[in-house]
Each structure stands twice: as C-alpha cells, then as structure tokens.
Image (spheres, rainbow, N blue to C red):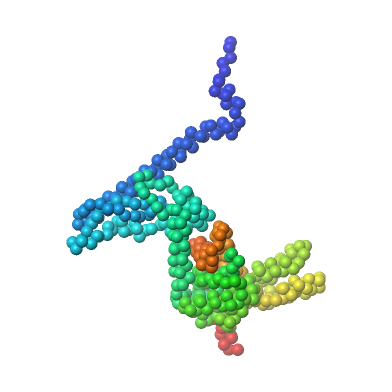
Amino acid sequence: MKRRTDKGLGNQVGLSLVEQVGQRLLPLVSGIAATKQGLLEWVHDFGLKALDELMRDDAARIVGEKGRTRSELTFGGRRISVEKPRVRSKDGREEALPALEEFRDRDPLSERVMNQLLLGVSTRGYDASLEPRPSGFTTRGSSKSSTSRSFVSKTRQRLSASLDRRLDELDLIGLLIDGIEVARQAVVVALGITSDGTKVPLGLAQGSTENAALCTSLLQGLLSRGLRVEDKLLCIIDGGKGIRKALDDVFGNRAVIQRCQVHKQRNLREHLPEERHAYVLSTMREAYRAATADTARKKLRALVSWLETNGHEDAAASLREGLEETLTVVKLELPFTLRRSLATTNSIENLVSSIRRVTRNVKRWRGGDMIRRWAGLGLFNAAKRFRRIKGYREMPKLVTALRTVAAKVAVA
C-alpha cells in the first residue's frame, strides 16, 4: 500500500512555531486593521452628515436657507472646514446656527494637544499621533507650529485660572511646601489641606534658588489672593531652612510645624553605615508609632544616647535637631491613620513627582515663562488624581486640637 503524504503538513513541519503562528494570524490582523479603518471612516462620514442635517434644520427654523458658506470646527484633534447654510436676519446680519456654535463651544483641540504632550508626544509628532484625516475635507491646526501655539495658549490660560484665583472661601487647616529644580531654576509649590481633608494646589513660585525670599514671596502671594489664616495652621515641611524661615516671617506663631518623619529617617541613614540602618530606622518608626508624645520622646532620646555612645555623633546631632517638631502630630493626639497622613510630606512629594515626570519631556527650554507653564501643567496633571487624605473623617479632631493649642498659647 502506498503511503500518502500531506504536502501541506510537510511544508508546515519545516517552519518554526513562531512562523506558523505568524502565517495563521497575519490574515486576521490585516482584516482587523482594515475593519478599524473602515469603521473610522464610517464614523467620520456619519458624524459630519449628522452635523450638516442639524445645521440645515437650524437654518430652516430661523429664516430658511439662503445659500451655503464655509466654517471651521474641531474634529478628531484637528480643525476641519465644513459647509454650512448661510442665514441672514432682516437687517442683513449673518445669524449664528445653534448646532454649529455648540460644537465650537466644545473645542477639544487644546485639551487633546495637552493630553498628547503629557503622554510624551512632541509637537512635531502630534499630527502623526491622531486618527487618519476625514476624507474629502480640508484640515489644519495639527502642524508643529499650530500645536505649539495651542499648547502655550491653553497652559497660560489654565495657569492663570488656577493659580491666580481667589482663596477667600478656602477653609485651610494644613499647608505643605516643597521645591523642585526645573531647567536649573527652583520651583516651589504649595499644597493646601482643607477641613474636610481635600488637597488643593495653591500656588507656585519660580526663582534661582529655593531660599527664604522665594518661599516668602509664594506665601505672601497666597495671602494677597485672600487666603485666611486666622487660627493655628498645621504646616508640614521637610526641614528646609528657607521654608521654615518663610513660615515664621509670614505666619508667625500661627504656624504649627510638623517636620517630615520620613525625611528625618533619610537624613539619619545618610550619616550611618549600612549595618546600623535596620536598628536605627526600626527604633525611629517604633517611636513615631507610640501612643503618647512622652513615650515617643523617651525612645528618640534613648536612641540619641545610643548613637553618641557608638561613635555616630553626626547622626545623633541630626536626630536631636528638630526632634520635637517631628512629634507634633503625636502631641496633637490625632487618630493613628490621620497622624500617618500628616506626619510626612508624601502628599506634596507626589505632586512634585508629577512635575518632574512632565518636565522631563522637554528637550529645549526657552525662558522662565516656559518653566512656569510646564511646572503648572505637572501640577494640574497631579490634581486630576487627587483624593482626600487618609483619615479625612477624623479631620474635626485636628481642628479641635489646633484650637486647643491656640487657647493654651493665648493663656500663656
């Protein structure tokens, strides 16, 4: 009996598994791509025809169509030119079509540009990142220069609307300040925490260095915009001398300082050999979790003595410096979850990280205005994901604790 040979199978045996899978999937992938393109073209065509019908209905309802003219609107991240009915009033003025005006009011071009640039798309590559152009229509507004102008205009508008707004109605109970270097310039940002635990970006200042004068300018700018600081305000800082001096100069004894516990641990780690890290850091964490300020203070002072005894004088001096201010939230007797949220500058460091992530997309800086706009863009991007601080339901206890501190100071 002759053995029959399956030629197709024989051909497949000589191919690798990857090649076999590729041959089988290639027609499927091509079909999907063609279907996507066809569907996109249908959506474009259907949407523009629907808009044309809406404009015709508007024209007929107003005075009846008197010919055709052209107008522009945004479509798919570009500006396109479409025909529209021409409608004139009795005195000869051209009437607006409600449907067209509504589409114009929903101009997503600048928003689209901003989102694309946040994802790392350059102004030169913006046009290529969009869906294919609608067939049969003239488009504009997606070139490098148009994209850049749109982005600059939108960021300036947002920066002004957000960072120049009035703060009179803000019920501020906490304040965080931190800085970042952008294009060899210092950018200092302020983040507020309201009485319900909401995080609110307050402002930013830009200068040559993160010094007391720059931080003072930022704080005075907040006051000039109506920020009310009539009672004690919990100010959470990383220990920078410039920020501390600015708070003292602007707010005086209304500023209740909480030094970041995480920064204090980092500082000690830099002064110690690696074999000492585990013991020292675990002891500090245990102290910061203590139920009372007295217990925490005793543990930290004992650690200072241990460091000095074992020849780590620099680490001991670092721990001793500002020790009481690292325990402010413990002394306020806050619930543990809220205490953890307010014991560190993590909230504002997330904001600073967003600025760092956004500004690294820039390859060429062109002056201070550009630095300020991009820093503001990073701030807005972070604010989109803001949630209230953990333990926000216990915020009334913080308000009460700060008022108690104010009362004790008044009596003294």
Which residue is painted at 57% across and 69% down in the image? Answer: 187
Which one is in front, 101 or 171?
101
Residue 388 shows in the view: no
Which residue is painted at 27% across and 57% down in the image? Answer: 97
Above or below, 326 against 350 in this view is below
Question: In the current view of this chain or complex, which residue is farthest to the bottom?
Answer: 412
Which residue is painted at 55% across and 34% down in the image? Answer: 22
Counting from the top left corner in percent of width and height, residue 362 is at 55, 59
**Does residue 170 appear to the left or right of 264 in the view shown?**
left
Which one is in front, 412 or 150?
150
Please identify the quarter of the rendering in which residue 154 is found. Answer: bottom left
Locate the N terminus and report the quarter of the image it occupies: top right
Which residue is painted at 57% across and 72% down in the image? Answer: 207
Counting from the top left corner in percent of width and height, residue 88 is at 22, 59
Locate the C terminus and report the quarter of the image it occupies: bottom right
Counting from the top left corner in percent of width and height, residue 192 is at 52, 72
Above or below, 5 against 82 in this view is above
Above or below, 92 against 176 in this view is above
Total residue callouts: 0
Question: In the current view of this chain or complex, which residue is farthest to the top?
Answer: 1
Question: In the current view of this chain or complex, which residue is farthest to the left?
Answer: 90
Residue 131 shows in the view: yes
Which one is in front, 250 or 6?
250
Please identify the quarter of the rendering in which residue 368 is found. Answer: bottom right
**Does residue 328 appear to the left or right of 68 in the view shown?**
right
Counting from the top left corner in percent of width and height, residue 240 is at 64, 73
